[in-house]
Amino acid sequence: MTDRQSVTEVQQSLRERKKARTRASIREHALRLFREQGYQATTVEQIAAAAEVSPSTFFRYFPTKEDVILQDDMDTRMFEALERQPPELSPIAAMRAAIREALASYTGADLAMLRETTSLTFTVPEVRARAIDEFARTINTFVVAVAKRAGRPADDLAVRAMAGAVMGVIMAITVPWETWAEQSWRTIDESFDQVDAALALLEAGLPL
């Protein structure tokens, strides 16, 4: 490695860390403002001012106000963990292990933020509507991951069916649209335990 390459890599690393700090700052200030004055009453301009960035910078990190809630790093952690799972594991077993690994990587503060954003997702109509787009994106990401593990193309019918089945089970457990208020007692651990139990049923062929 040349000195020039080393300098370039350091500069890239610094830029990425700065971008991560800016992104985190925007989210933290947004959630604080949502708590203090409500989601609908909070504007992008207010969030940007609190984070000391311009509205245009806000939109470079988050395409919409809803995305500041929806775009966390859970998917990133989960799919990076999925990459690390042994190739002999089935897609469902690998996904179960990846979810457990991703959850274990969260600090108490991370979990508190996840709980808060989850509550907003299920109780704010605008965010609920936007969440459908995020679920579709997550399914497509999982399709690519399953295809890579199976050595098949992403448009393979079995690959897409498997990815859809897994993500459908996860959505069925974690998206209690009409009963979220009744289930607000559930902790993050309890929610993920239910996801794991449901995926175990899928892995066993969904016996009834």
Image (cartoon, rainbow, N blue to C red):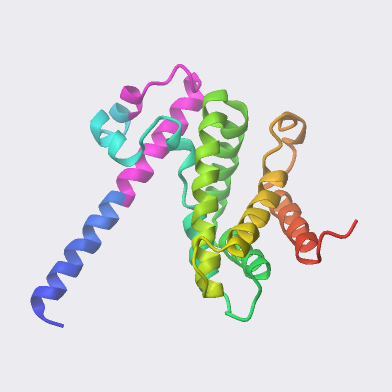
Q: Residue at x 55, y 64 (%)?
A: 156
Instruction: Give the quadrant of residue 90.
Output: bottom right
Asked whether, in this view, residue 53 is left or right of residue 135, the answer is left
Total number of numbered discs in the rendering:
0
Instruction: Give the quadrant of residue 118.
Output: top right
Q: Residue at x 30, y 30 (%)?
A: 48
Q: Position of residue 193 (x, y in %)?
A: 74, 56
Residue 124 within the magenta-colored segment of the rendering: no
Q: Main secondary structure of the magenta part?
A: helix
Residue 12 sits above or below residue 39 on the image: below
Asked whether, in this view, residue 62 is left or right of residue 164, the answer is left
Q: Which residues are magenta?
A: 20-47
Residue 18 sits above or below residue 65 on the image: below
Q: Position of residue 75 (x, y in %)?
A: 51, 54
Q: Position of residue 36 (x, y in %)?
A: 49, 23
The residue closer to the viewer here, 34 or 2, is 2
Question: As drawn, which residue projects farthest toward the left?
Answer: 4
Which quadrant would the C terminus be assigned to in this image?
Answer: bottom right
Q: Position of residue 101 (x, y in %)?
A: 59, 66
Question: As drawn, which residue projects farthest toward the right?
Answer: 208
The residue closer to the viewer here, 159 or 179, is 159
Q: Residue at x 19, y 67 (%)?
A: 10
Instruction: Give the quadrant of residue 196.
Output: bottom right
Which quadrant would the N terminus be assigned to in this image?
Answer: bottom left
Residue 105 sits above or below residue 168 on the image: below
Residue 202 sits above or below residue 122 on the image: below
Q: Residue at x 30, y 34 (%)?
A: 59
